[in-house]
Amino acid sequence: MIRPILSKIQREFSGQRSFHHVAEISQHHRIQSSPGYRDAAQYCQKIFHSDGVKAEILSYPANYQTSYWTNAMWDEWFCKEATLDILGDQPIRLCDFQAEKMSLIQRSIATPKEGVVAPIIWLEHGDDETAYPDLDLHGALVFTDGDWNKVRSWAVEKRGAIGIISERMVEFPIVRHRFDIPDAILYTSFWWTNYEKKCFGFALSPKQGDWLKKNCMKQMALHHKDSKQPAYLSAKAFVDSQLYPGSIENVSAYIPGNTKEEILITAHLCHPQASANDNASGVAVAMETARTLKKLIETGALPKPKRGIRFLLIPEMTGTYAYLSQNEAKIPKIMAGLNLDMVGEKQELCQGPLVVEYPPQATQSFVGDLMAGVLEAVTEEAKNLAGTTSYALFKYAISPFSGGSDHYILSDPTVGIPSPMLIQWPDKFYHTSADTLDKVDPQMLYRVGCMSATYAYLLANLEVKDIDWILPLARASYLSHINNLLKKDMEISLQQNILDKEKTFAQTRELLDHLCALKEAEMMDLQRFVPKNKQQLRRAVNRQSKILRSFTDSLLKEQKTALGISDEPDNTTLPPALSSDRIPVRLFRGPFNARGSVEKQPKVIQTQYQTLFRDFPSLRSCNNQLLYWTDGKRSVSEICRLTTLETGIPCVMFAESYFQILHEMHLISWK
């Protein structure tokens, strides 16, 4: 049961200890494959050791010749110093790497030792090359508020620019407009593949960017009045940096169990200084979770678990790909995971809720329901005046799979480590220089830490008797979900004519059929934990499935009657007939990482890939699900149907082309 374990953990876990770790880790400039990241990894290893938890640093080559599954690597990077000065009668220093690490686009290459002096040309009409057919950029610093990598691909590669000045600030509606954080600088980086022309670049805050735009226009106006005046401002750029074959590091800590099976907790250690919430917070919670569990097991407050618990601190994505690809024989023993990413936010400042994000549906596991159940127990913080109910003093939410962090690799069915994620999203200060220690809440670190430790220990010690309380958790999750779906369906249908009502109802019915079958498969995932009790589990799941099906049918019948629907069309979510509905077979493990994989293909394939994602921009959010559902048995039509049921996004046209491109890249075969 959740609460007896949770209560013991709540007495031991320290949010303040976690906060101290965030303070220490956030002092390091933790760029993947860099000395600063390595220093942070050594700090984490030291803390694990001081808390009595065995830990080691695992090192993997980082160079352009190395790939881990489809994840192509890059060279190590180190920067000692970088500055950008606007020249004139009174030179103004806009950027200083030593003062603010995010003022430099990470992985910038070095300038000559004496620096470079160059004109600043403002791209005032966006980041598309076609807007500047006759603009001479040779030897210039290009100033843009658009996508700096897109600008680099044509301004540097084709037009001879020597560097980029970016004032981009990614906005999140409601939570973040560029003027909400005028002094913050966006985290920017070049992700080199060694197939491109490299350059250096600097990043500005919105306030700095507006100042520079104003002065660029002022200089151009002076030139128009007097042609002897230069048309552009001049700047001196200096970067002292190195790119060289190096390494990446994972910190692996382990609490042993009685078997070789493991539960895995991941948290990425990388990102620029300070990146306190993203993700010094996740790392700090993982370390304090390890200390807490070690202490409780050592003192006998908790029995030694059946399965070991591993803590893996990684450079995001890269370290997970490396660890899994180098430990393929161990993967079947890793029963489940949990990813911690941005978990310490002070909600009144950062604004986002604490989110439990489920694994993708194709993973077909109960662990998302378990994590949601642990969250529910943690929300019992305060009572009403009469003391008859409890509720949370913080914002929280449950979310379907979205991806974007290491759980998307672990949860890929070709890996088979179902992993929910704990995250606070959105965050007003995400990926900016304003993600600092003052945005971190020790109480939130405490809540998430108690959740993480409880989840990990429950799974580490899960046995057949736990079926009786885990299955009702799964049932409750399903019933809550379908009630919300039917309520939404009713709200939509009441505004429709009868034909549209019938179509909406049929789509909802098909979705509920899918979710009911999926929930049964998720409950049967318990079989991996209790393989000797398959028949007992099957009987218990059958009982729950009958309840779910009966309840679903009753609700659908009532909804149909209330809407006045006599009949409805069938197969409303099935994709249209395909020209060749073949079965794709994956030839690679883990999600497909396009960076570095596409660039080494013939130009025609590169163009096909880039055109596909340009023509279907919304499909970027579900191309992973297409691959997750690709099991070597399902046709493209069935994969598209399942992906649409999961994401709500029609994807047939995209999927046909996507799978064909992957086939041409020798990443899938057809049968």
Image (tube, rainbow, N blue to C red):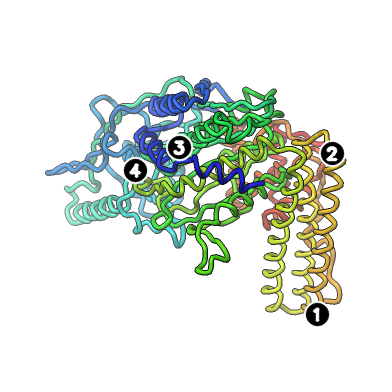
Measure the C-alpha gap from mark 4 to mark 2. Answer: 57 Å
Do tag 3 and tag 2 residues touch (Cβ < 8 Å)? no
Looking at the image, tell me whether mark 3 or mark 2 is earlier in sequence order.
Answer: 3
Looking at the image, tell me whether mark 1 or mark 3 is earlier in sequence order.
Answer: 3
Residue under label 1: 564
Do tag 2 and tag 1 residues touch (Cβ < 8 Å)? no
Quick check: 183 left or right of 48? left
As shown in the figure, which amino acid type bears the numbered disc 1?
Answer: Gly
Residue under label 4: 203
Considering every residue shown, the one lying at the far left of the view is 89
Provide residue 21's location: percent of width, then percent of height.
Answer: 40, 36
As shown in the figure, which amino acid type bears the numbered disc 3?
Answer: Ala
Q: How crowded is mark 2: few (under 14 residues within 10 Å), some or many (20 or more)?
A: some
Looking at the image, tell me whether mark 4 or mark 2 is earlier in sequence order.
Answer: 4
Measure the C-alpha gap from mark 1 to mark 3. Answer: 56 Å
Residue under label 2: 534
Q: Residue 284 carries which label?
A: 3
As shown in the figure, which amino acid type bears the numbered disc 2?
Answer: Lys
As shown in the figure, which amino acid type bears the numbered disc 4?
Answer: Ala
Provide residue 431's location: percent of width, then percent of height.
Answer: 42, 45
